[in-house]
Image (cartoon, helix red, strand yellow):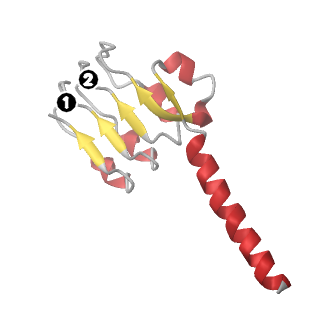
């Protein structure tokens, strides 16, 4: 009986920790604000900021789940984008992107990619 309780407790703690990690992801609308807590950035919304280049500071947010760069003037996505292995959604529509780097294939969790 003690083993059963112990195993159940371990499983409960594992599930709780997993849920807690999801709850702690924060949404930011500026890179400057996000840089204050880079390990808590889950969602980065940078629509219409008139970026002409992909902001390389984004690569500091290792646990990003979503990047929204819609409605900018970005032409090139850097190969380093493949380092963001937790990325699930990448919004790049309404930019001037000519091609995507091969490293986009490293984003195994990527579920949604918007390019239009």
| Residue drawn at x 31%, y 54% as measured from the top left | 105
Q: Position of residue 10 (x, y in %)?
A: 74, 69
Disc 2 target residue: 74
CB atoms of marks 1 and 2 within 8 Å: yes
Left or right: 58 with respect to 10?
Answer: left
Disc 1 target residue: 97
**Distance from the alpha carbon under mark 1 to that under mark 2:** 6 Å
| Residue drawn at x 34%, y 35% as measured from the top left | 78
| Of residues 106 and 44, the one drawn nearer to the viewer in this rendering | 44
Would you identify the image quadrant in which residue 106 lies?
bottom left
- Secondary element type, mark 1: loop
- Secondary element type, mark 2: loop
Would you identify the image quadrant in which residue 3 lies?
bottom right
Left or right: 82 with respect to 22?
Answer: left
Quarter of the image for the C terminus: give it: top left
Disc nearer the start of the sequence (1/2): 2
Q: Residue furthest top?
A: 50
Q: Position of residue 80 (x, y in %)?
A: 40, 40
| Of residues 99 and 40, the one drawn nearer to the viewer in this rendering | 40
């Amino acid at each position: 009986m003690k083993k059963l309780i112990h195993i159940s407790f371990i499983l409960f703690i594992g599930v709780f920790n997993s849920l807690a990690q999801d709850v702690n992801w924060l949404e930011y609308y500026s890179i400057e604000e996000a840089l204050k807590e880079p390990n808590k950035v889950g969602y980065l919304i940078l629509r219409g900021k008139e970026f002409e280049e992909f902001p390389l500071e984004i690569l500091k947010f290792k646990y990003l789940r979503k990047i929204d760069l819609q409605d900018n003037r970005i032409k090139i996505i850097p190969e380093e984008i493949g380092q963001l292995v937790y990325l699930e959604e990448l919004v790049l529509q309404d930019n001037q992107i000519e091609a995507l780097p091969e490293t986009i294939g490293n984003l195994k969790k990527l579920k949604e990619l918007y390019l239009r």
